[in-house]
Image: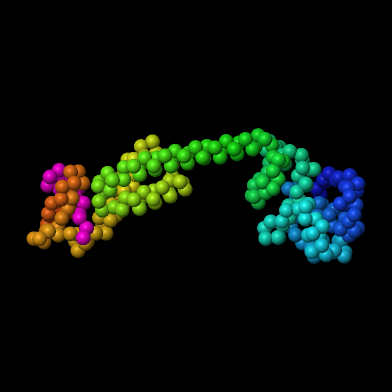
Amino acid sequence: MSKRLTDTNKWKKKWFRNLDNDYKVFWIYILDNCDHAGIWEVDFEMAEWFCKTIDEGRIRNVFEKQYYEFDNGKRWFLKDFIDFQYGTLNEKNRVHLSVINILKKNNLINVNKGLISPLLGSKEKAKDMEEDKEKDKKVDQIKKIKKELPLLIAEFPNVDVAFELQKWQDWMLANGKIYKRYKPAFKNWCRSKYVDEKKKMSLDNIKTDTTGFYMGRCIKCKKVASYDKWGISQDSRCCKAEICPVSK
């Protein structure tokens, strides 16, 4: 059996004093039947059994300032409950921490603004600032890569570098880490896409010269030369580097 503080001054408050007796009983009923975070599972059928003649529509109107409705109307959060029962919540208090976790889980922190310990607020603020700082670093890295797009396009002729950069940006801002050597990291990303595309490329998709030989570009010196069907999958003659087939 849980024990709670009760506000004896409610009988002096005009809004409570003017209620019909059944509605006074209803208010006391939900104060006793909400959980320790002030959340009541809406059940007017059960409430009417104790409070007799009550009307749901009128109750919602009479007590509209006393509760916050959420979960598609299935639950009410009693706005003044925490302030009266606990005062300012402090995460170092085990009971308070349980209440704070319930508020967080149900996105009720902002509804209960001002009742959380400044210590908790400062921690969340510091965390948000750190996340913003990290995001700014990622955005700065992406901007620097964008300035080198022409060079990257030339280095990866068989890869849609602009498209891959957009995918890289979406991934980075969502869950990617900050790279100290972000340019090589992005090049590795492009290189992996190039390898994937090369694997997919068949001889029918490679451009040929007038004699029917396949055209390939040396990834080191960018020189285009003709190769037979075996040579196109080997190293270039010029630099002994990987050959990038020229697509049709």
Vertical relation: 45 (above or below) 78:
below
In the rendered view, does 212 fall on the left or right side of 48?
left
Viewer-proximal residue among 8 and 135: 135
Q: Residue at x 60, y 39 (%)?
A: 124
Quadrant location, the C terminus: bottom left
Which sits in the foreground, 2 or 35? 35
Dominant secondary structure of the magenta stretch?
A: loop
> Is any atom of residue 64 visible in this view?
yes
Colour scheme of the rendered structure: rainbow
Q: Is residue 34 in view from this perspective?
A: no
Tell me where residue 186 appears, x and y as whole percent: 34, 44
Residue at left offset 14%, top offset 59%: 208
Q: Nearer the viewer, residue 165 or 26?
A: 165
What range is drawn magenta here?
235-248
Indicate left or right for 104 with 177 as reference: right
Q: Quadrant of residue 230?
A: bottom left
Residue 151 position by quadrant: top left
Name the residue at 46% across, 39% down.
136
Q: In the rendering, at what x and y percent does residue 153 appear?
A: 28, 48
Q: Is residue 98 magenta?
A: no
